[in-house]
Image (spheres, rainbow, N blue to C red):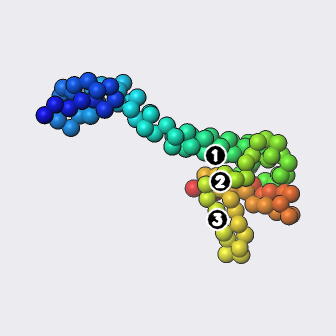
Amino acid sequence: MEKNCLECGTRIIGRSDKKFCNDSCRNSYNNKFNKDSKNLVRNINNRLRKNYRILEALNPDEKTKTTKSKLTTAGFDFNYFTSIYTTKAGTIYYFVYDQGYLPIDGGEYYALVKRKT
């Protein structure tokens, strides 16, 4: 049985389960196939990375307080976080990996914390 490359259509020589003639065709095919989802994931990861760097820069001592305007001026986006932690008292912390923030004083100030690992 003769098989052809899924990307360029040339005849494949080698293993019976081989789908592409070379690495270039395999990479090109997979890049086209995953283009839309990769862009979405890349953009979200970039946003999370930026939020993490901002929290890390504003919280060098692992526990501090800052204003909402400092966060937004630095480019922080409150829509992107990785997890939510609710204490027994009902306090809600938002985390970007191990860097967290808690809205206080009606949301004008934020307590910044770092989760111990």
Q: Given the current orientation, which residue lies at the most extreme bottom position?
A: 89
Q: Label 3 belongs to which residue?
A: 85
Q: Amino acid at mark 3?
A: Tyr
Q: Is residue 3 above or below residue 61?
A: above
Pointer 3: residues within 10 angstroms few (<14), some, or many (20+)?
Answer: few
* Label 2 – label 3 distance at C-alpha: 11 Å
Q: Is residue 7 above or below residue 107?
A: above
Question: In this rendering, would 42 be left or right of 87?
Answer: left
Q: Total of numbered circles in the picture?
A: 3
Q: Amino acid at mark 1?
A: Leu
Q: Residue at x 57, y 56 (%)?
A: 117
| Proximity of marks 1 and 2: CB atoms separated by less than 8 Å | yes
* Label 1 – label 2 distance at C-alpha: 7 Å
Q: Label 1 belongs to which residue?
A: 48
Question: In this rendering, would 106 be left or right of 96?
Answer: right
Q: Amino acid at mark 2?
A: Phe
Q: Residue at x 82, y 63 (%)?
A: 104
Q: Label 2 belongs to which residue?
A: 81
